[in-house]
Image (cartoon, helix red, strand yellow):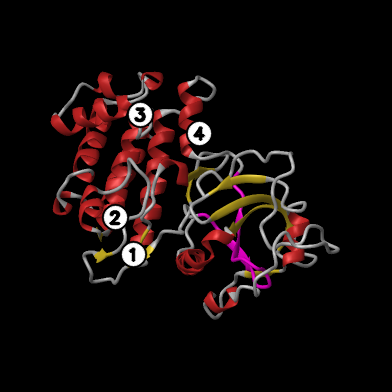
Amino acid sequence: MGNCCVTPQPQQQPQPPGWSRGVSGGQPALPPAEPYPASATIPEGSSLRQFTTDELVAATNDFSRVIGEGGFGRVYHGRLIHPPGPEGRELEVAVKVMAAEHITGGVSSFQVEVASMTAMRHPNVLQLLGFVCDSPSPVLVYEYIPRGDCTEFLKASSKGEVHFPWRARMIVALGCAEALAAIHEANYVHRDFKASNVLLREDLTAVLADFGLAKAVTDWATHVSTRVMGSMGYIDPIYFQSGQLSRKSDTYAFGVFLLELVSGRLALEEQFQELRRLVVAKTFPDPDLVVDQRIQGEWSKKHVYITFTLIRFAISFDWEHRPSMSVMRDKMKTIVDEIA
């Protein structure tokens, strides 16, 4: 759901298959399946709200504003009153509808996403507001983050459209480290951590999204064996080669992301790969060759070298050399505190 926060487009978009067009009725695009038993996956006592199909048809203006597509479905922009009742206020939401062609895999992904998001209430994790219990496809309703994701923000910075200061980048990295550490403490691995899954609030607070690929792990296990999934550029090479997933796989992806923030380059760019080799090969590479030229004069060599060291250990080809995300969080907090 990394790109679920792009500014909504006004043009009419295809409606989810199996959904009636219009609150008052209409013919479904395809014969609807049996309503998905979403409530069966919701932990007892959960504060998640059960929305109706009609509520979301109205909230999304007939599913006319597609704002993103993820691995298991399409995301729509909407407005609704939350919580319901006289105390509620109008709230912008992102409505994630699982794609019909992925309904079998989508059910599994839906259950994982609900379970993981319910277990991890954290200021740096995207807030899940509720679900739909009478729909032909699994549906999740999230808070809407209008500013965009970190990939788009880095692109805008590279074009000179916004200024992304060194301290703000370190605060974003700290927020992500906080989120990943909390996820790991709740016995989950995110498995798809990347810049486009890091959303930014107006004050540039980082919010981690898209838990559709999250994997539960026991608190004592060092790794689990599973089908390799994730995004190119961020996939742990040990996981890619062996199918063994670890919390340290998220550490690897975080190291890649931290280098993106420091350099202003995106993970799949050719120049990024050159910078990565430089940081790994040299204990103290010249910061002027690595750090984003647009933030020259904003950083100290001490803090840059600390980030280089964190990156080098995080993307090590040996799990034993990679720090836990709680260690990464503590190191990032030290940097941010000293910058202030």
Q: Which residue is mark 2?
A: 326
Mark toward the start of the polypeptide (1 vs 4): 4
In this rendering, position of residue 227 left or right of residue 5: left
Camera-nearest residue between 232 and 164: 232
Q: Of tags 2 and 4, which is closer to the observer?
A: 4
What is the span of residues highlighted in magenta in the rendered image?
126-145
Q: Is residue 324 visible?
A: no
Q: Secondary structure at mark 2?
A: helix
**Amino acid marked by disc 2:** Ser
Q: Position of residue 113 (x, y in %)?
A: 48, 64
SS under mark 4: helix
Q: Residue at x 86, y 63 (%)?
A: 24
Residue type at numbered disc 1: Glu
Q: Quadrant of the C terminus?
A: top left
Structural distance between the alpha carbons of marks 2 and 3: 29 Å
Q: Residue at x 55, y 59 (%)?
A: 101
Q: CA distance from mark 2 to mark 4?
A: 27 Å
**CA–CA distance in space, label 1 to label 4:** 29 Å
Residue where numbered disc 1 is placed: 185
